[in-house]
Image: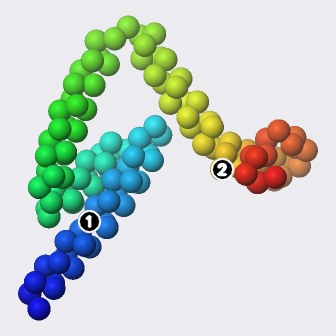
Amino acid sequence: MHHLLRHGKRIGTAIVGGLVVLIGLILIPYPGPGWLIVFAGFAVLATEFEFAAKWLAWLRGKYATWTSWLKRQHPAVKIGGLLLAGLVILATVYLLNTFGAINRLFHLDQTWLISPFFR
């Protein structure tokens, strides 16, 4: 019975930790705590899996290196990164039909605002 509970706990931890990591990865380009959520997911996984603890340490190091590199960059590089993130956000909002909903709400009759997934 003890072995069964232990195995169930590992499976539950894998599912919860994996979902948290996945959500964090999806949220990285958006304003908010995307990376923090990824780290939290790996921290959950690290409670049961040694590979996750190693990945968490590696990710923390890479994140620190990347932020250090970004701080040393010319403002144009920083602005370019922000513009790229903004384009990812706009593309996602468009594809999820947010602009189409606004179009419909205000009766704008602009078909180009409707996502191709919702036509």
Q: Is residue 9 left or right of residue 23?
A: left
Name the spot of residue 35 as percent of width and height, x first: 33, 42
Q: Is residue 62 left or right of residue 24?
A: left
Secondary structure under tag 2 reads loop
What residue appears at the point 21 percent right and 60 percent down from the top-left corner?
44
Indicate the quadrant where residue 78 lies: top left
Name the spot of residue 62 as percent of width and height, x first: 22, 31
What residue appears at the point 45 percent right and 10 percent down from the top-left corner?
76
* Residue 102 in sight: no
How many residues crowd around disc 2 within 10 Å: few (fewer than 14), some, or many (20 or more)?
some
Residue placed most toward the observer, 14 or 23: 14
Secondary structure under tag 1 reads helix
Q: CA distance from mark 1 to mark 2?
A: 29 Å
Residue type at numbered disc 2: Leu
Total number of numbered labels?
Answer: 2
Name the spot of residue 57 as percent of width and height, x first: 14, 41
Label placed on residue 14:
1
Q: Quadrant of the N terminus?
A: bottom left
Q: Are marks 1 and 2 in contact (CB under 8 Å)?
A: no
Mark 1 or mark 2: which is in front? Answer: 1
How many residues crowd around disc 1 within 10 Å: few (fewer than 14), some, or many (20 or more)?
many
Q: Is residue 41 left or right of residue 87?
A: left
Label placed on residue 96:
2
What residue appears at the point 15 percent right and 84 percent down from the top-left corner?
5
Name the spot of residue 97 as percent of width and height, x first: 71, 49
What residue appears at the point 17 percent right and 78 percent down from the top-left corner?
7
Look at the picture and state if 95 lies above or below 15: above
* Residue 45 in sight: yes
